[in-house]
């Protein structure tokens, strides 16, 4: 049993092995320094080698190798900026909010290290505009660091699903609406004010800080040889919502409540993929292990829906259709049509072929990953639950007998 | 697929690489000019927005450039593959 | 060339310009309507719009040149660009000069459209409406044939068709708007 700190809006944050190791002593800079010490001042080349060695990938969902992003930002022309994206657009994700509240200085250490390595003196912190606690916590943490020669700029993101996408964040920083636009080059090459921009989410910077504060060997002590380290997960199940830190290689049985591995689980959030009942029993918390069976860890959201996964997928799709920014035609028109088609599948009036066709029609046809992520989740619901789809086609549902509603 | 691959003789016009047509989706407003100018590659979806089929081969490069120029919303870009 | 000849040419090019510019504006107004496969293929109306506008530009040069070269009225070469200080019909000449300046801006921005970006180009391009309207007023007020019935009919027809086209465009949504309101 680990002590639980009350996180954002009733989310339990459990003490973890590395990132969340020091949360019991509070979020202050003094407590942070007592536990983690002072970060060194690494040079770019050895840091890149260390990042390569521990295989750190972005934790925002796409999983791009962080070292390659850092290297791209360092090599591109112009003085780079560092952006910490704490605005989780995905409403089911609470890990960056939890980090901001319980270990803000780990995130800031990572950001400051990245800024110094890149020869930059400004760090942009993008916080969820609606979450007053996160904002207050980050503001306090920044005030504690006044004597550091780094300028921290706060930006408040909109409360919208697509507002957290990298291009949308860069729009926000430019004073334009916080919505995605087409980018022709990655932000690391050409981002904020046309300059190279190292934009990653909060957990990624916290992981970087751990590496710099405690060294490669300490980082390699967690996880597996193939996938060192830990990952933050936001778990939603019958017990409520909690943020936990799991070492890579941990069995899902140890992460989820006792019999939840025998239920369908949505991994990676609303843009994620479905694991069939029992499928997680033989699997571990692992990007590559999950990818081998067509699953994704995404930004670490783990949802165990109460009831029929197909019906749940349909309502998530409707939500995602509503969350389209409405800027790109295929998304704006396609997602409502897709939601409608999937709704027909769940109510047993056809729609299966149409759903698959619409998935193909929206994919890779938008400025951001919203249509792709939605299609991924819908398609995995169809392929993971074929028996359930058939049952719904005959007007049934294996989950209805239990409790109705 | 294998038939198409075999049709390209090795060493024939290798210096002209294939190009890729990319759409600036927020800019596109389904005017459909690209479909008229480049039906070889572009189809329209249910709502009139372009579906870019294949890569742009060197023979289609001129037509693709015309489509890029012709787009009233300036929503098309041609990039080397 | 005789002065009479220049004067005839000037009036002639003016009247033809009215027709050509009106047709250009019409095609431009209607280009944003409907979707592929309606009345005309969009690329046909678009190239017609483009070629007519270029023809209009050539006619405009001829119109201005004949006015400057003609010695019956005192119009200097710089009056082609500066809408001020002409001795002959200073107000209505200035209106015409302003129209041709605007047309020049529209042409130049279109030539470098790729570098300007859509928004900027669009804003300048919308000045074409103003240019057309100023041109019409210029012709009506300065033209020596404006009292003639055929001339009055031409002016009213030009104003009428453009007004109808603009109304049609405002009332009928673009293809994208047909699907609903967009941000």
Image (cartoon, helix red, strand yellow):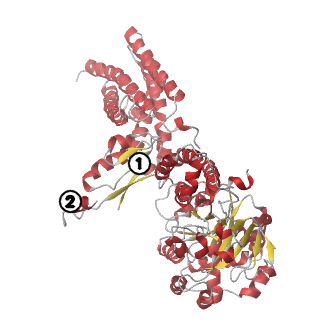
Is the N terminus of chain A in the top left, top right, bottom left or bottom right quadrant?
bottom right
Q: Residue at x 77, y 80 (%)?
A: A29
Could you tell me if residue C77 is visible in this image? yes
Name the quadrant containing residue A143. bottom right
Q: Nearer the viewer, residue A225 or B64?
A: A225
Name the quadrant containing residue B44. top left
Could you tell me if residue C83 is visible in this image? no
Q: Nearer the viewer, mark 2 or mark 1?
A: 2
Q: CA distance from mark 2 to mark 1?
A: 25 Å
Chain letter belonging to callout 1: B
Q: Position of residue C24 (x, y in %)?
A: 38, 29
Mark 1 or mark 2, which is nearer the start of the sequence? 2
- Res. B51 mark: 1
Query: Which residue in the protein does label 2 denote?
Result: B7
Chain letter belonging to callout 2: B
Q: Nearer the viewer, residue C78 or A32?
A: A32
């Amino acid at each position: 049993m680990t002590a639980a700190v009350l996180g954002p809006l009733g989310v339990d944050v459990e003490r973890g092995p590395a990132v969340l190791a020091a949360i019991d002593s509070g979020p202050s800079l003094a407590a942070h320094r007592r536990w983690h010490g002072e970060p060194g001042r690494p040079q770019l080349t050895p840091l890149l080698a260390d990042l390569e060695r521990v295989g750190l990938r972005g934790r925002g969902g796409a999983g791009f190798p962080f070292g390659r992003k850092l290297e791209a930002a360092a090599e591109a022309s112009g003085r780079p900026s560092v952006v910490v994206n704490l605005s989780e657009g995905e409403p089911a994700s609470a890990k960056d909010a939890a980090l901001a509240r319980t270990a803000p200085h780990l995130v800031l250490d990572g950001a400051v290290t990245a800024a110094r390595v890149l020869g930059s003196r400004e760090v942009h912190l993008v916080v969820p505009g609606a979450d007053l606690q996160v904002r207050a916590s980050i503001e306090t943490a920044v005030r504690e660091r006044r004597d550091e020669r780094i300028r921290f700029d706060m930006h408040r993101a909109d409360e919208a699903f697509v507002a957290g996408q990298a291009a949308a964040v860069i729009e926000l920083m430019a004073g334009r609406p916080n919505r995605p636009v087409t980018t022709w080059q990655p932000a690391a090459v050409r981002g904020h004010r046309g300059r190279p921009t190292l934009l990653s989410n909060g957990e990624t910077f916290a992981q970087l800080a751990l590496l710099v504060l405690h060294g490669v060997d300490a980082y390699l002590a967690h996880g597996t040889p193939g996938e060192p380290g830990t990952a933050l997960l936001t778990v939603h199940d019958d017990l409520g919502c909690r943020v936990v830190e799991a070492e890579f290689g941990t069995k899902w049985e140890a992460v989820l409540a006792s019999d939840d591995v025998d239920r369908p689980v949505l991994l990676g959030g609303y843009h994620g993929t479905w694991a069939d009942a029992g499928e997680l029993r033989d699997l571990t918390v692992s990007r590559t292990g999950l990818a081998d069976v067509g699953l994704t860890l995404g930004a670490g959201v783990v949802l165990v829906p109460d009831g029929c996964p197909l019906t749940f997928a349909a309502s998530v799709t409707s939500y995602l259709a509503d969350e389209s920014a409405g800027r790109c035609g295929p998304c704006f028109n396609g997602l409502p049509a897709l939601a409608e088609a999937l709704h027909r599948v769940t109510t047993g009036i056809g729609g299966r072929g149409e759903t698959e066709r619409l998935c193909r029609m929206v994919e890779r046809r938008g400025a951001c990953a919203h249509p792709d992520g939605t299609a991924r989740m819908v398609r995995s619901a169809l392929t993971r639950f074929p028996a359930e789809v058939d049952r719904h086609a005959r007007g049934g549902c294996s989950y209805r007998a239990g409790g109705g509603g | 697929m294998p038939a198409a691959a075999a049709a390209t003789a090795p060493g024939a016009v290798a210096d002209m690489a294939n190009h890729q047509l990319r759409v600036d989706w927020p800019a596109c407003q389904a005017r459909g000019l690209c479909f008229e100018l480049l039906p070889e590659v572009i189809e329209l979806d249910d709502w009139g927005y372009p579906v870019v089929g294949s890569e742009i081969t060197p023979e289609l490069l001129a037509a693709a450039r015309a489509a890029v120029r012709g787009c009233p919303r300036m929503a098309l870009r041609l990039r080397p593959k | 060339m005789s002065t009479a000849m220049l004067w005839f040419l000037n009036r002639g090019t003016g009247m033809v310009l009215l027709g050509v510019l009106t047709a250009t504006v019409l095609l431009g107004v209607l280009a944003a309507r409907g979707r592929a496969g309606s009345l005309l293929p969009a690329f046909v109306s678009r190239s017609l719009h483009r070629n007519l506008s270029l023809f209009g530009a050539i006619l405009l040069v001829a119109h201005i040149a004949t006015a400057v070269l003609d010695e019956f009225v005192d119009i200097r070469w710089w009056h082609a660009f500066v809408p001020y200080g002409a001795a002959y019909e200073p107000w209505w000449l200035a209106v015409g000069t302003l129209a041709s300046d605007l047309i020049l801006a529209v042409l130049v921005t279109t030539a470098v459209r790729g570098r300007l970006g859509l928004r900027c180009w669009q804003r300048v391009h919308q000045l074409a409406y103003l240019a057309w309207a100023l041109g019409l007023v210029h012709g009506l007020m300065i033209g020596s044939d404006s009292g003639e019935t055929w001339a009055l009919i031409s002016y009213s027809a030009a104003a009428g068709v453009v007004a109808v086209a603009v109304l049609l465009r405002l009332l009928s949504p673009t293809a994208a708007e047909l699907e609903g309101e967009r941000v």
